[in-house]
Amino acid sequence: MRRRKTAIFFLIFGISLSALALALNVGWILLNIREVALLVLGMIFFALIITGIVLNTIFLVREVRKSEQHDAFLNSVTHELKTPIASIRLYLETLKTRDVSPEKQQEFYDVMLADSDRLLNTVDQVLSASKTGETRSRYDVEELDIGGLLEDSASIVRSRYNLDPGSIRIAETEAELRVQGDSHELQTAFVNLLDNAVKYSPGGAKVSVRVKASPIRNRLDIFIKDNGVGMEATELKRVFKRFYRVPQADGMKVKGNGLGLFIVNSIIKKHGGSITADSKGAGRGSTFIVQLPKA
Protein backbone atom coordinates (compact mmCIF):
# COMPACT_ATOMS: atom_id res chain seq x y z
CA MET A 1 0.00 0.00 0.00
CA ARG A 2 2.82 2.39 0.87
CA ARG A 3 4.57 1.71 -2.45
CA ARG A 4 1.31 2.31 -4.33
CA LYS A 5 0.77 5.66 -2.59
CA THR A 6 4.33 6.69 -3.43
CA ALA A 7 3.86 5.75 -7.10
CA ILE A 8 0.56 7.70 -7.24
CA PHE A 9 2.23 10.76 -5.71
CA PHE A 10 5.02 10.77 -8.28
CA LEU A 11 2.54 10.14 -11.08
CA ILE A 12 0.52 13.22 -10.06
CA PHE A 13 3.77 15.12 -9.62
CA GLY A 14 4.81 14.21 -13.18
CA ILE A 15 1.43 15.28 -14.61
CA SER A 16 1.70 18.61 -12.76
CA LEU A 17 5.18 19.18 -14.15
CA SER A 18 3.95 18.43 -17.65
CA ALA A 19 1.06 20.90 -17.23
CA LEU A 20 3.46 23.54 -15.95
CA ALA A 21 5.73 22.98 -18.93
CA LEU A 22 2.78 23.43 -21.29
CA ALA A 23 1.71 26.62 -19.50
CA LEU A 24 5.21 28.03 -19.80
CA ASN A 25 5.32 27.28 -23.53
CA VAL A 26 1.98 29.02 -24.05
CA GLY A 27 3.17 31.91 -21.91
CA TRP A 28 6.27 32.33 -24.03
CA ILE A 29 4.15 32.59 -27.16
CA LEU A 30 1.80 35.13 -25.64
CA LEU A 31 4.45 37.28 -24.01
CA ASN A 32 6.86 39.52 -25.84
CA ILE A 33 9.84 37.38 -26.85
CA ARG A 34 12.04 40.45 -26.86
CA GLU A 35 12.06 40.47 -23.10
CA VAL A 36 15.44 38.71 -22.74
CA ALA A 37 15.37 38.38 -18.95
CA LEU A 38 11.97 36.72 -19.02
CA LEU A 39 13.09 34.42 -21.82
CA VAL A 40 16.22 33.30 -19.94
CA LEU A 41 14.21 32.74 -16.76
CA GLY A 42 11.66 30.72 -18.69
CA MET A 43 14.40 28.59 -20.27
CA ILE A 44 15.85 27.83 -16.83
CA PHE A 45 12.43 26.85 -15.46
CA PHE A 46 11.75 24.75 -18.54
CA ALA A 47 15.07 22.90 -18.18
CA LEU A 48 14.31 22.20 -14.51
CA ILE A 49 10.85 20.91 -15.37
CA ILE A 50 12.18 18.61 -18.12
CA THR A 51 14.80 17.27 -15.68
CA GLY A 52 12.09 16.62 -13.11
CA ILE A 53 9.95 14.79 -15.68
CA VAL A 54 12.87 12.58 -16.72
CA LEU A 55 13.76 11.73 -13.11
CA ASN A 56 10.12 11.09 -12.32
CA THR A 57 9.79 8.72 -15.30
CA ILE A 58 12.92 6.82 -14.25
CA PHE A 59 11.53 6.44 -10.73
CA LEU A 60 8.17 5.18 -12.00
CA VAL A 61 9.84 2.60 -14.27
CA ARG A 62 11.92 1.34 -11.34
CA GLU A 63 8.87 1.15 -9.09
CA VAL A 64 6.96 -0.83 -11.72
CA ARG A 65 9.86 -3.28 -12.05
CA LYS A 66 10.15 -3.66 -8.27
CA SER A 67 6.42 -4.23 -8.01
CA GLU A 68 6.55 -6.91 -10.71
CA GLN A 69 9.49 -8.64 -9.01
CA HIS A 70 7.72 -8.45 -5.65
CA ASP A 71 4.57 -10.01 -7.11
CA ALA A 72 6.61 -12.74 -8.80
CA PHE A 73 8.35 -13.43 -5.48
CA LEU A 74 5.03 -13.74 -3.62
CA ASN A 75 3.67 -16.09 -6.28
CA SER A 76 6.76 -18.30 -6.24
CA VAL A 77 6.95 -18.44 -2.43
CA THR A 78 3.24 -19.24 -2.20
CA HIS A 79 3.75 -22.08 -4.67
CA GLU A 80 6.87 -23.30 -2.86
CA LEU A 81 4.91 -23.41 0.42
CA LYS A 82 1.62 -24.86 -0.86
CA THR A 83 3.08 -27.66 -3.00
CA PRO A 84 4.94 -29.61 -0.25
CA ILE A 85 2.11 -29.01 2.24
CA ALA A 86 -0.45 -30.41 -0.22
CA SER A 87 1.83 -33.39 -0.93
CA ILE A 88 2.35 -34.19 2.76
CA ARG A 89 -1.39 -33.89 3.41
CA LEU A 90 -2.18 -36.27 0.53
CA TYR A 91 0.21 -38.96 1.80
CA LEU A 92 -1.05 -38.60 5.37
CA GLU A 93 -4.67 -38.99 4.22
CA THR A 94 -3.67 -42.07 2.22
CA LEU A 95 -1.96 -43.61 5.26
CA LYS A 96 -5.00 -42.82 7.41
CA THR A 97 -7.72 -44.13 5.12
CA ARG A 98 -6.09 -47.11 3.39
CA ASP A 99 -4.17 -50.22 4.28
CA VAL A 100 -0.67 -49.64 2.98
CA SER A 101 2.10 -52.21 2.94
CA PRO A 102 5.18 -51.54 5.12
CA GLU A 103 7.33 -51.02 2.00
CA LYS A 104 4.89 -48.47 0.65
CA GLN A 105 4.69 -46.76 4.04
CA GLN A 106 8.46 -46.36 4.08
CA GLU A 107 8.31 -44.85 0.60
CA PHE A 108 5.61 -42.40 1.73
CA TYR A 109 7.67 -41.40 4.77
CA ASP A 110 10.70 -40.68 2.57
CA VAL A 111 8.62 -38.49 0.26
CA MET A 112 7.10 -36.59 3.18
CA LEU A 113 10.52 -36.02 4.71
CA ALA A 114 11.81 -34.69 1.39
CA ASP A 115 8.78 -32.37 1.13
CA SER A 116 9.27 -31.14 4.69
CA ASP A 117 12.96 -30.42 3.91
CA ARG A 118 11.87 -28.43 0.86
CA LEU A 119 9.35 -26.51 2.97
CA LEU A 120 11.94 -25.80 5.66
CA ASN A 121 14.44 -24.64 3.04
CA THR A 122 11.94 -22.10 1.65
CA VAL A 123 11.16 -20.76 5.13
CA ASP A 124 14.89 -20.53 5.95
CA GLN A 125 15.53 -18.53 2.78
CA VAL A 126 12.78 -16.04 3.53
CA LEU A 127 14.00 -15.64 7.12
CA SER A 128 17.61 -15.25 5.97
CA ALA A 129 16.57 -12.58 3.47
CA SER A 130 14.75 -10.65 6.20
CA LYS A 131 17.84 -10.78 8.45
CA THR A 132 20.11 -9.29 5.77
CA GLY A 133 18.58 -5.89 6.42
CA GLU A 134 19.68 -5.98 10.07
CA THR A 135 22.90 -3.98 10.20
CA ARG A 136 23.68 -5.23 13.70
CA SER A 137 22.80 -8.88 13.23
CA ARG A 138 25.00 -11.11 15.39
CA TYR A 139 26.93 -14.13 14.22
CA ASP A 140 29.39 -16.46 15.93
CA VAL A 141 32.91 -16.09 14.60
CA GLU A 142 35.19 -19.10 14.67
CA GLU A 143 38.10 -20.47 12.68
CA LEU A 144 36.83 -22.81 9.96
CA ASP A 145 38.38 -25.30 7.58
CA ILE A 146 36.99 -24.15 4.23
CA GLY A 147 37.48 -27.58 2.65
CA GLY A 148 35.42 -29.33 5.33
CA LEU A 149 32.74 -26.63 5.14
CA LEU A 150 32.43 -27.07 1.38
CA GLU A 151 32.27 -30.87 1.70
CA ASP A 152 29.48 -30.62 4.27
CA SER A 153 27.58 -28.22 2.00
CA ALA A 154 28.01 -30.55 -0.97
CA SER A 155 26.71 -33.49 1.08
CA ILE A 156 23.54 -31.54 1.90
CA VAL A 157 22.89 -30.78 -1.76
CA ARG A 158 23.70 -34.34 -2.90
CA SER A 159 21.23 -35.67 -0.34
CA ARG A 160 18.59 -33.11 -1.34
CA TYR A 161 18.64 -34.19 -5.00
CA ASN A 162 19.75 -37.84 -4.53
CA LEU A 163 22.95 -37.23 -6.50
CA ASP A 164 25.96 -39.51 -6.79
CA PRO A 165 29.26 -38.33 -5.23
CA GLY A 166 30.76 -37.47 -8.62
CA SER A 167 28.10 -34.88 -9.42
CA ILE A 168 29.77 -32.34 -7.10
CA ARG A 169 33.55 -32.65 -7.04
CA ILE A 170 35.70 -30.70 -4.58
CA ALA A 171 39.34 -30.47 -5.63
CA GLU A 172 41.93 -31.22 -2.97
CA THR A 173 44.02 -28.31 -1.74
CA GLU A 174 47.75 -28.45 -1.12
CA ALA A 175 47.37 -27.23 2.45
CA GLU A 176 44.56 -26.74 4.94
CA LEU A 177 43.04 -23.34 4.19
CA ARG A 178 41.05 -21.68 6.95
CA VAL A 179 38.73 -18.70 7.24
CA GLN A 180 37.03 -16.90 10.10
CA GLY A 181 33.26 -16.65 10.19
CA ASP A 182 29.93 -18.09 11.21
CA SER A 183 29.81 -21.73 10.10
CA HIS A 184 26.00 -21.78 9.81
CA GLU A 185 25.82 -18.64 7.66
CA LEU A 186 28.74 -19.61 5.40
CA GLN A 187 27.25 -23.08 4.96
CA THR A 188 23.95 -21.42 3.98
CA ALA A 189 25.80 -19.40 1.35
CA PHE A 190 27.63 -22.40 -0.15
CA VAL A 191 24.53 -24.63 -0.06
CA ASN A 192 22.63 -21.96 -1.99
CA LEU A 193 25.42 -21.70 -4.57
CA LEU A 194 25.65 -25.46 -5.05
CA ASP A 195 21.86 -25.81 -5.07
CA ASN A 196 21.66 -23.22 -7.87
CA ALA A 197 24.39 -24.99 -9.82
CA VAL A 198 22.41 -28.24 -9.68
CA LYS A 199 19.01 -26.70 -10.43
CA TYR A 200 20.29 -24.85 -13.50
CA SER A 201 22.03 -27.92 -14.96
CA PRO A 202 19.03 -29.78 -16.44
CA GLY A 203 21.07 -32.30 -18.39
CA GLY A 204 22.72 -33.75 -15.29
CA ALA A 205 24.78 -31.66 -12.90
CA LYS A 206 28.57 -31.68 -13.07
CA VAL A 207 29.76 -29.18 -10.51
CA SER A 208 33.41 -28.59 -9.67
CA VAL A 209 34.63 -26.69 -6.61
CA ARG A 210 38.17 -25.42 -6.25
CA VAL A 211 39.86 -23.44 -3.46
CA LYS A 212 43.16 -21.63 -3.76
CA ALA A 213 45.08 -18.76 -2.23
CA SER A 214 44.11 -15.47 -3.88
CA PRO A 215 46.62 -13.18 -5.59
CA ILE A 216 45.37 -10.59 -3.09
CA ARG A 217 47.21 -10.98 0.19
CA ASN A 218 45.48 -12.88 3.03
CA ARG A 219 42.54 -13.92 0.85
CA LEU A 220 41.07 -17.16 -0.45
CA ASP A 221 39.31 -17.72 -3.77
CA ILE A 222 36.58 -20.37 -4.05
CA PHE A 223 35.49 -21.28 -7.59
CA ILE A 224 32.14 -23.05 -8.09
CA LYS A 225 31.69 -24.03 -11.73
CA ASP A 226 28.76 -25.82 -13.36
CA ASN A 227 27.81 -27.07 -16.83
CA GLY A 228 24.35 -25.51 -16.76
CA VAL A 229 22.36 -23.03 -18.78
CA GLY A 230 24.76 -20.14 -18.28
CA MET A 231 23.97 -16.43 -18.42
CA GLU A 232 24.29 -13.49 -20.74
CA ALA A 233 26.76 -10.75 -19.77
CA THR A 234 23.92 -8.38 -18.85
CA GLU A 235 22.69 -10.79 -16.15
CA LEU A 236 25.99 -11.27 -14.29
CA LYS A 237 25.44 -8.43 -11.81
CA ARG A 238 21.64 -8.50 -11.69
CA VAL A 239 21.51 -12.07 -10.32
CA PHE A 240 22.55 -10.83 -6.86
CA LYS A 241 19.59 -8.45 -6.53
CA ARG A 242 16.66 -9.26 -4.27
CA PHE A 243 13.80 -11.10 -6.06
CA TYR A 244 15.66 -11.12 -9.41
CA ARG A 245 15.60 -14.30 -11.49
CA VAL A 246 17.37 -14.93 -14.79
CA PRO A 247 14.88 -15.30 -17.67
CA GLN A 248 14.49 -19.01 -18.38
CA ALA A 249 14.70 -20.65 -21.77
CA ASP A 250 11.57 -22.06 -23.42
CA GLY A 251 10.44 -25.30 -21.82
CA MET A 252 12.67 -24.84 -18.77
CA LYS A 253 10.93 -24.38 -15.41
CA VAL A 254 13.31 -23.98 -12.49
CA LYS A 255 11.68 -23.44 -9.12
CA GLY A 256 12.91 -20.59 -6.96
CA ASN A 257 12.02 -17.31 -5.29
CA GLY A 258 14.81 -14.96 -6.35
CA LEU A 259 16.39 -14.83 -2.88
CA GLY A 260 19.20 -17.42 -3.02
CA LEU A 261 21.99 -15.35 -4.59
CA PHE A 262 20.86 -12.21 -2.78
CA ILE A 263 21.32 -14.07 0.53
CA VAL A 264 24.70 -15.42 -0.61
CA ASN A 265 25.93 -11.94 -1.55
CA SER A 266 24.77 -10.49 1.79
CA ILE A 267 26.46 -13.23 3.84
CA ILE A 268 29.75 -13.02 1.93
CA LYS A 269 29.85 -9.22 2.25
CA LYS A 270 29.13 -9.45 5.98
CA HIS A 271 32.20 -11.70 6.28
CA GLY A 272 34.38 -9.11 4.56
CA GLY A 273 34.44 -10.95 1.22
CA SER A 274 33.04 -10.55 -2.26
CA ILE A 275 31.33 -12.68 -4.91
CA THR A 276 31.21 -12.36 -8.69
CA ALA A 277 29.61 -14.39 -11.47
CA ASP A 278 31.14 -15.31 -14.81
CA SER A 279 29.67 -17.03 -17.86
CA LYS A 280 30.55 -17.33 -21.54
CA GLY A 281 26.88 -17.08 -22.47
CA ALA A 282 23.67 -19.07 -22.63
CA GLY A 283 24.22 -22.84 -22.58
CA ARG A 284 27.88 -22.56 -21.58
CA GLY A 285 27.70 -22.92 -17.81
CA SER A 286 28.48 -20.47 -15.03
CA THR A 287 31.26 -19.90 -12.52
CA PHE A 288 30.82 -18.14 -9.20
CA ILE A 289 33.97 -16.80 -7.54
CA VAL A 290 33.80 -16.22 -3.78
CA GLN A 291 36.65 -14.35 -2.10
CA LEU A 292 37.03 -14.52 1.68
CA PRO A 293 39.70 -13.31 4.13
CA LYS A 294 42.02 -15.97 5.50
CA ALA A 295 41.86 -16.81 9.18
Image (cartoon, rainbow, N blue to C red):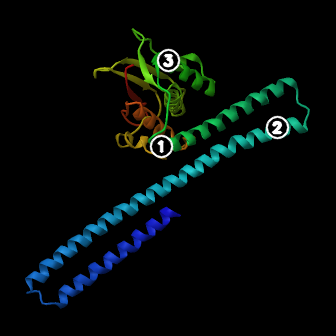
- Location of residue 105 (image quadrant): top right
The residue drawn where x is 42% and y is 17% is 178
Answer above or below: position of 177 versus 12.
above
Question: Which of the two discs, 1 and 3, labels the residue nearer the N terminus?
Answer: 1
Q: Is residue 4 left or right of residue 88?
A: left
Q: Where does residue 275 sit, x and y in percent of width and height?
A: 38, 32
Mark 1 lies on a secondary structure that is loop
Question: Which of the two discs, 2 and 3, labels the residue nearer the N terminus?
Answer: 2
Residue identified by numbered label 2: 92
Instruction: Please state which of residues 192 and 235 is positioned toward the viewer in this rendering.
Output: 192
Residue identified by numbered label 1: 134
Residue identified by numbered label 3: 169
- Front label number (1 vs 3): 1
Q: Is residue 228 visible?
A: yes
Mark 2 lies on a secondary structure that is helix
Number of marks in picture: 3
Structural crowding at the residue carrying mark 3, measured as other residues with C-alpha within 10 Å and reported as few (<14), some (14–19) or many (≥20):
some
Q: Where does residue 238 sit, x and y in percent of width and height?
A: 40, 44
Circle 2/circle 1 CB separation < 8 Å? no
Circle 2/circle 3 CB separation < 8 Å? no
Structural crowding at the residue carrying mark 2, measured as other residues with C-alpha within 10 Å and reported as few (<14), some (14–19) or many (≥20):
some
- Location of residue 49 (image quadrant): bottom left
